[in-house]
Image: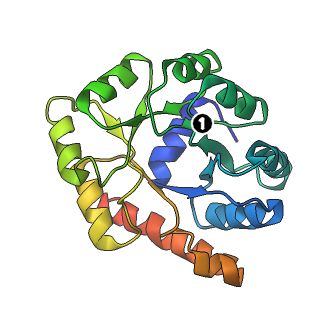
């Protein structure tokens, strides 16, 4: 499967929901990521949290290169270029950040890796676009104005592609509000991959929830 910049961006938009996940146990990560891929969301944002997170990512990325080449692993919570470089060397195919960092953007552009920086204003979004970012992350989504903020930005800047994280839930009312406002994708974490499912090792249940969310987004977009 192609995992170049354009293919990754298209995949992110197509699935609509981007599962956001981290766990220190490599086997749990493998099972959750496989469940997400089987549910129709092969693009997953691995969160850079916890001690030795990059080592966990390396093992997981190596596993999926052969176990399921559909899987496209990106990394979130990246705030500096050295960390971005480490994850790119370990196989990351896209970067997500809670902030806008020009050094990360330059590094990702040099390696033709999509970078979605966190923005909280039209000025930050415009700066991110100047740095070459195709999809910007609005973060924290619900705190900077929610769907109304999305609509307000898209009025004068209709070319903008926005992927919020924080505030978008895997239910019909939330998805209608956000995708109706014009977002192209949304990051979802603990509401999509619940602690209850993790505790029960209910990977089939995670896969079903992801599939329901992907299908619901397609329905709201009018593609179902």
Position of residue 85 measured from the top left corner of the image (x, y, whole percent): 70, 26
Q: Up-down: is 48 above or below 215?
A: above
Q: Quadrant of residue 91?
A: top right
Residue at the image point whose x is 71% and y is 61% from the top: 23
Number of numbered markers: 1
Would you identify the image quadrant in which residue 139 lies? Answer: top left
Query: Can I make out residue 78 in this image?
Result: yes
89 lies left or right of 8: right
Residue under numbered circle 1: 94
Q: Residue furthest front?
A: 51
Instruction: Check the picture and name the quadrant holding the C terminus.
Output: bottom left
Q: Residue at x 84, y 51 (%)?
A: 63
Looking at the image, residue 106 sits to the left or right of residue 46; the answer is left
Q: Nearer the viewer, residue 133 or 11?
A: 133
Q: Position of residue 184 (x, y in %)?
A: 37, 46
The percent position of residue 165, horizontal first and vertical second, equals: 42, 51
What percent of the width, then of the height, locates residue 93?
65, 36
Q: Quadrant of residue 75?
A: top right
């Amino acid at each position: 499967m192609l995992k170049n910049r354009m293919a990754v961006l298209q995949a992110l938009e197509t699935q609509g929901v981007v599962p956001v996940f981290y766990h220190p146990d490599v086997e749990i990560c493998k099972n959750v990521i496989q469940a997400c891929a089987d549910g129709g969301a092969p693009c997953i944002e691995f969160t850079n949290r916890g001690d030795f997170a990059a080592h966990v990512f390396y093992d997981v990325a190596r596993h999926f290169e052969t176990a399921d080449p559909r899987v496209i692993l990106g990394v979130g919570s990246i705030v500096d270029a050295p960390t971005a470089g480490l994850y790119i060397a370990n196989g990351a195919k896209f970067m997500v950040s809670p902030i806008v960092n020009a050094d990360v953007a330059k590094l990702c552009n040099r390696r033709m890796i999509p970078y979605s920086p966190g923005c909280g204003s039209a000025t930050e979004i415009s700066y991110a676009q100047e740095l070459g970012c195709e999809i910007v992350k609005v973060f924290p989504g619900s705190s900077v104005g929610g769907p109304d903020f999305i609509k307000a930005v898209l009025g004068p800047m209709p070319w903008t592609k926005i992927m919020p994280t924080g505030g978008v839930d895997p239910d019909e009312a939330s998805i209608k509000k956000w995708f109706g406002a014009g977002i192209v994708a949304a990051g979802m974490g603990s509401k999509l991959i619940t602690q209850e499912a993790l505790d029960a090792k209910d990977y089939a249940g995670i896969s079903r929830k992801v599939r329901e969310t992907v299908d619901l987004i397609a329905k709201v977009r009018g593609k179902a």
